[in-house]
Structure formats: C-alpha cells, structure tokens
Amino acid sequence: MLRARHSKSRVSRIDVREITPCSGYARSMTWFFGALVVVFGVTLLGFCVWSVVRTDDARRFVGLFASSASAHYKEQFARLIAGLGLLGNSPHMRFSTFFEVLGWAIVVTALVLIALPWRWHHRFGLLVIPLAQKYVIAYGMMAGLLGGFLIYSTVA
C-alpha cells in the first residue's frame, strides 16, 4: 500500500493495483499506432490521387510489385508495419473488430509471404498485376476509399 495526501490533509491508503505505472507509455504507444494508421490511410489516399492524375506512372508502380527479392521484402515489411499499426490501434478506432480482423489478415499474409520463396510471389504477381494495371484507376479509388475510412475511423 502507498500513502497519498488528499486536499484536507487526510492521509488515505491507495491500492497499488490501481496505479498504472505505464499509462504514459501506453498513451504514447496509442499515439504511435494511431499515427501509423493515419500514415497508411494518407498513403492510400495519395495513391488514389496519383492513379487518376498520373495513370501511366501508377501503372508502372503497380508493375514493380514482387518484381525482385528486394521489392518483395520491402512490400512485406511495409505491410507488417501497416498491419501492426491496425492491430495496435484497432481498440481505439470505430469499427474496431473490422480493423482488428483486417490487421491480422495483413500481418498473417505478410508473414506467410516472407516465409515463402519470393519467386512464388513473383509468379502470382505475373497473373494478377496485369489486371491491376488495366484497372489502376478503379484500384486507386478503392485504395482511396479504404484510406479515407481508416483516417475517419482513427480520428472520429
């Protein structure tokens, strides 16, 4: 038990279990995860605008996905950061269950892709990337919707 002084100079006992020594740490982690989610959302919104304004550049960018081992691992690292940000911030977001499930889906698929040979991801990309390039504006619009939804759910 700890002693605490109150306004009328009475001394009372405080249960140690009521004190949260890492509340400052927890608060800073909440801000950190929230910032990660907002950056993720802004990135998706940026891709949305880019896909409309500079469609050919956006097509080339999408074509770079899984094009090399370096690109593959950079993609998965970025996905892990975004997924962990969602997992860490989902309890504080609107639609928290949805974002927790989305965060787990992103993290688990990123870990699976890290564990698999990158050439498998490359082969899969050869099938999917041409479709994403063909519909890059629609792809960008969907990314923008998700980005806006992420930001709204974080700051609301």
Image (spheres, rainbow, N blue to C red):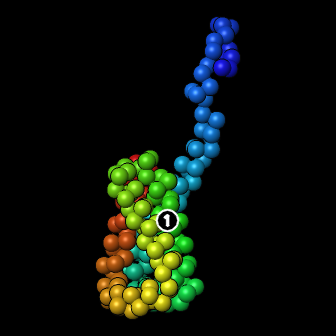
- Please name the residue that numbered disc 1 is placed on: 82
Residue 17 position (above or below residue 114): above
Residue at coordinates 66% horizontally, 20% vertically from top-left? 1
Determine crowd level at label 1: few under 14, some 14-19, many 20+ residues with C-alpha closer than 10 A.
many
Residue 144 position (above or below residue 66): above
| Residue 14 found in image quarter | top right
Q: What residue type is labelled 1?
A: Ala
Q: Is mark 1 on a helix, strand or loop?
A: helix
Observer able to see residue 27: yes
Q: Nearer the viewer, residue 113 or 90?
A: 113
Residue 67 position (above or below residue 40): below
Q: Where is residue 74 in the image (x, y as percent from the top left)?
A: 56, 78
Q: Position of residue 149 (x, y in %)?
A: 36, 60
Residue at coordinates 41% horizontally, 50% vertically from top-left? 93
Q: Position of residue 27 (x, y in %)?
A: 57, 43
Q: How many labels does the image show?
A: 1
Q: Which of 114 and 26 is in front in this view?
A: 114
Observer able to see residue 40: no
